[in-house]
Image (tube, grey):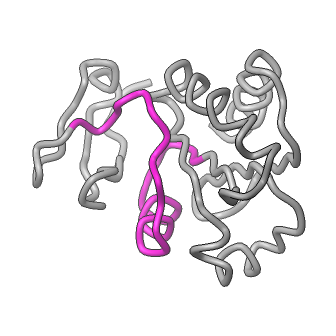
Amino acid sequence: MTGAVHVVCPACNTVNRVPRGRLHDQPRCGRCKDVLFSGKPVALTQEGFNRHMKHSDIPLVVDFWAPWCGPCRVLAPVFEAAAAQSEPGVRLAKMNTDEHPALAQSFNIRSIPTLAVFHNGREVARQSGAMPLEALVRWIRNATELEQ
């Protein structure tokens, strides 16, 4: 795997070109100098979601959740641990459906938590409900391997 990939900065939403072989070298944003991969899920806004989905070459796994949801609170630390294991080949992000109901509605999110994988601007996989870490990491790998 050679060449460069486009990676959206989680802090300022700038699109960065990173040599594929340097993804594991803790690359920094060319604009704001923040790290591009922190091993934690990114909290997305509508603009951030659009930038990551449309301009990043790495798959985006989004946890659609709400603060009042018990299973969402159970999944939160598992999702964070999965981010630490999955980056930099995959970006994990969280989308609060209470703050962004129109986005959740546009993707027909009917129950939460719902995890969706986006790659090359389209949804490629979906899973509802909480799951243990090993199952989540396996699901992410299976869903993203099919697309790469």
Query: Is 45 within the magenta?
Result: yes
Tell me which residue sits at (37%, 27%) in the image.
2
Quarter the C terminus occupies = top right
Residue 65 placement (x, y as % from top left): 70, 56
- Residue range in magenta is 35-60
Q: Is residue 125 above or below residue 12?
A: above
Tell me where residue 21 sits by quadrant.
Answer: top left
- x, y percentage for residue 52? 46, 59
State the residue lying farthest toward the bottom.
102
Question: In the image, 80: left or right of 5?
Answer: right
Relative vertical location of residue 83 with respect to residue 72 in this rendering, above or below: above
Q: Is residue 130 above or below residue 66?
A: above
Q: Residue at x 42, y 65 (%)?
A: 48
Q: Quadrant of residue 81?
A: top right
Q: Quadrant of the N terminus?
A: top left
Within the magenta stretch, is there residue 64? Answer: no
Which residue occupies 54% across, 29% down?
Answer: 83
Residue at the image position 34 percent from the left and 33 percent from the top: 37
- The answer to whether residue 43 is left or right of residue 95 is left
Q: Position of residue 49 (x, y in %)?
A: 50, 65
- Note whether 148 is above or below 93 in the view shown: above
The front one of 66 and 102 is: 66
Tally the marks: 0
